[in-house]
Image: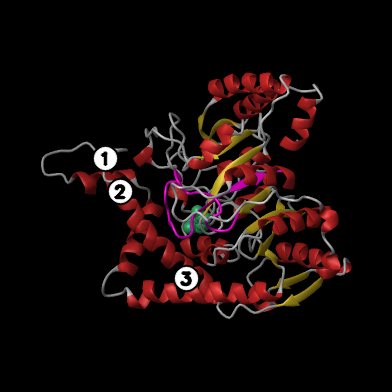
Amino acid sequence: MDYTTFRKQVLDKENSVVEQTKEFIKSIEDKTHLNSFITTNFEKALEKASESDKRFLEGEPRKLEGMIIAIKDNISTKGLRTTCGSKILENYVPIYDATVVERLNKAGAIIIGKTNMDEFAMGSSNETSYFGAVHHPLNSDYVPGGSSGGSAVSVAADMAFTALGSDTGGSIRQPAAFCGNIGFKPTYGRISRYGLVAFASSLDQIGTFANSIEDTAALYEVIAGVDAKDSTSANIPVEDTMLNIDNLNPKELKVAILSDVELKNCSDEVLSVYYSILRKIEQQGISIEEVSFDNFDAFIPTYYIVATAEASSNLARFDGIRYGYRAELQNGDDVIVKTRSEGFGAEVKRRIMLGTYVLSSGYYDAYYGKALKARRLIYDNYKKIFNQFDFLFLPTTPTPPFKIGEKLNDPVSMYLSDLFTSSANLGSVPAISIPLGASSQGFSVGMQIQSNHYEENKLLNFSKYMLSL
Ligand code: GLN
């Protein structure tokens, strides 16, 4: 059930927020083997639930009254542990709320807990968390995707109505595609990053997991909008998301698709869903045309240079001195070296080393400088496409979910999971993954839609339309 349906039930006095909260708590307790939560917030959630019920009774429910939501553990929650899936922040309890959390609280949403994630959001499978891997709800031998895997699982396995995640190169869309829910990454700057622990600041974006477009829209409208605490947040009004699909005239829409060469790394299972949807789109009279991304092969290298460079700088703050874990020291030990050696996991260390290398004076021009130029070309390419087309339609991931352990020791193959997602972050455009098919094993297969900057309304409308086909 989605929140929109639940809200109607509560308004019709057929359900209550307290009852529903108890149901979600039971589901979380029954499914601890999925390992989707790092910290739960049951007591507070129940307290807030009875407050919400009161507001419903008094006829004054707020916009997200009683929306039970899970929050990725790299988003700051005052008084509630925020670990980033890392030993270095294992016992870190923030003294402030992220802007998104503040807005959720004001709108009546209820935080049920903090979800497991790849350490510092670095990963595509949710296996790099210090708190252990997250498992796919359909088959625990498989990964749920990452890095926001805990959030995707919490929504897929009935532990919350919705969840927040962060998407730096695909970390919302990819696990949403694997777990069968809707994962939405708005335009860079649409949602304040204040209180989101930084991985790669110029790519990071908070976004949503939900089971319906209505829920996605309601949540987005509350958390989006300019914020004085984040100078990169966009001062562009967030319109009410019109969900009137009747306004959409398919015959006027122009959808761009990638060429077959760009899809060569996709598995047959993903391709068969992709082509069947393309046929459906054509049957609706929507015009489809192939476009070329001259720089398609540069997506992954550019992403991994920009992301690691920024990460190496952002993660310098974890030094064992100001906050977080501090190693036990013996005479002669360097506090920073020992703390970071013990506190960070292997993937985070790999990223810090890569990032430091590409930024080093001898290699800056060859790697980081060049990546910035490539990024600009990717951005320009998007502008060219969206001057001519309404949407770009493409798979979310090249393959359905893979087995736990399958790619852990092969970083390059793991990094290729981001083949179709990272460009939206490099070009700052909004993107959404919606479940539009299934693999032979029954795993959901997600397809992705991207649109021009700040066209979230149009994107959500079209997604709703696509889900209805
Ligand atoms: N999988 C990508 C990475 O490992 C993206 C992560 C993300 O979006 N946070 O960097």
Residue plotted at (43% across, 73% down): 371
Q: Residues within 10 Å of mark 2 (few under 14, many from 20)?
A: few
The amino acid type of the residue labelled 1 equals: Arg
Q: Which of marks 2 and 3 is nearer the N terminus?
A: 3
Magenta highlight range: 186-212
| Secondary structure of residue under mark 2 | helix
Residue 412 or residue 43, whichever sits in front: 43
The quarter in which the N terminus is drawn is top right
Left or right relative to 197: residue 143: right
Percent of width and height locating residue 99: 49, 41
Front-most of 243 and 317?
243
Above or below, 444 relative to 284: above
Which residue was labeled with disc 1?
322
Residue 297 at x, y = what percent? 54, 76
How dense is the environment of label 3, judged by Cα within 10 Å: few (below 14), some, or many (20 and up)?
Answer: some
Q: Is residue 237 magenta?
A: no
Q: Mark 3 points at which residue?
A: 301
Q: Is 191 one of the magenta-colored residues?
A: yes
Q: In this view, does 405 lie to the left or right of 355?
A: right
